[in-house]
Image (spheres, grey):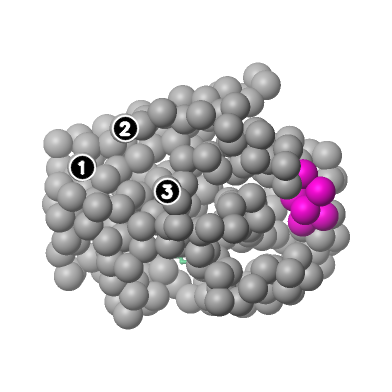
């Protein structure tokens, strides 16, 4: 897959007004609930909003997307603001974060039938919402193999699991080498992109067969006892 950064930044530019408004809401919400580790609108813009915006042209047209562990809405809110053709579910297990994201979505005029906020552990949500999304993505959620167990059950065969990662991601992928098919996934492809002096990576797995029903295991198990051991 090719990442067309120029097209993504064109979409970011076109939607900059709304994205800046969202950044301002995120900065003010952050003083009440910790939605991201970054304070200050300019830093939020550079380190988070632009990073999420960089991938926006990669989303398939009309895709159903879930952002697992959305925190303050990253990356799902950025994608919903730049791409009115995609449906986005923003999922997090912390009630206060979900309430803040729901309020931001409402203030940004995002319609609930297109952008929904769900407060749940992904392990529980995936039991009832199996293999319904075209893309499941996570940013700063957990190590790649853990994330693959949590996200693969949510994605329909033919869809994709995305992990937004920093420079260490190949080390994280190593334990799963040759074994991803056990989760219904292809071998991963890693796309590199640079944002100023920051080197970022997107890991993409294709969903090639149904994920066995035993995944995801109950909450916390994916970290405690990795599936590949
Ligand atoms: C470090 S934050 C990242 C937030 C956001 N994606 C970002 O890039 O700023 C991780 C978020 O994942 C949520 N989380 C962790 N494990 C989860 C799970 N199994 N189900 C749902 N949410 C989860 C946490 O509540 C937290 O808000």
Asked whether disc 2 touches disc 1, contact meaning CB atoms under 8 Å apart, the reply is: yes
Asked whether disc 1 touches disc 3, contact meaning CB atoms under 8 Å apart, the reply is: no
Callout 3 secondary element:
loop
User: Of callouts 3 and 2, which one flags the residue occurring earlier in the amino acid sequence?
Assistant: 3
Q: Residue at the location (18% across, 69% down)?
A: 214
| Residue 60: image tag | 3
Inter-mark Cα distance, 1 to 3: 18 Å
Q: Is residue 32 left or right of residue 222?
A: right
Picture coordinates of residue 131, whole percent (x, y):
28, 66
The front one of 39 and 58 is 58
| Residue 189: image tag | 2
Q: In this rendering, which labeled residue sits more in front, label 1 or label 3?
A: 3
Find out if the beta carbon at label 1 lies less than 8 Å from the nearest ligand 1 atom.
Answer: no
In the rendered image, the vertical position of residue 144 relative to residue 36, given as above or below: above
Q: Which residues lie in the magenta part?
A: 16-23
Callout 1 secondary element:
loop
The residue beneath circle 1 is 186
| Quadrant showing the N terminus | top left
Taking the image as four quarters, which one is ligand 1 found in? bottom right
Is residue 218 at all visible to an observer of this figure?
A: no
């Amino acid at each position: 897959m090719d990442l067309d950064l120029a097209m993504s930044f064109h979409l970011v530019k076109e939607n900059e007004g709304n994205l800046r408004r969202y950044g301002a809401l995120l900065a003010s919400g952050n003083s009440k609930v910790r939605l991201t580790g970054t304070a200050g609108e300019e830093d939020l813009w550079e380190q988070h909003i632009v990073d999420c915006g960089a991938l926006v042209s990669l989303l398939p047209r009309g895709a159903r997307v879930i952002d697992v562990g959305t925190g303050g809405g990253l990356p799902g809110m950025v994608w919903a603001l730049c791409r009115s053709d995609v449906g986005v579910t923003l999922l997090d297990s912390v009630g206060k974060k979900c309430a803040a994201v729901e309020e931001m979505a409402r203030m940004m005029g995002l319609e609930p039938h297109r952008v929904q906020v769900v407060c749940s552990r992904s392990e529980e949500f995936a039991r009832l919402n199996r293999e319904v999304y075209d893309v499941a993505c996570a940013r700063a959620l957990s190590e790649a193999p853990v994330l693959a167990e949590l996200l693969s059950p949510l994605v329909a065969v033919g869809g994709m699991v995305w992990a937004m990662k920093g420079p260490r991601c190949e080390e994280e992928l190593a334990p799963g080498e040759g074994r991803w098919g056990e989760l219904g996934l292809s071998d991963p492809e890693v796309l590199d992109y640079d944002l100023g002096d920051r080197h970022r990576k997107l890991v993409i797995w294709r969903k090639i067969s149904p994920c066995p029903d035993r995944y995801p295991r109950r909450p916390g198990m994916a970290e405690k006892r990795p599936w590949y051991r």
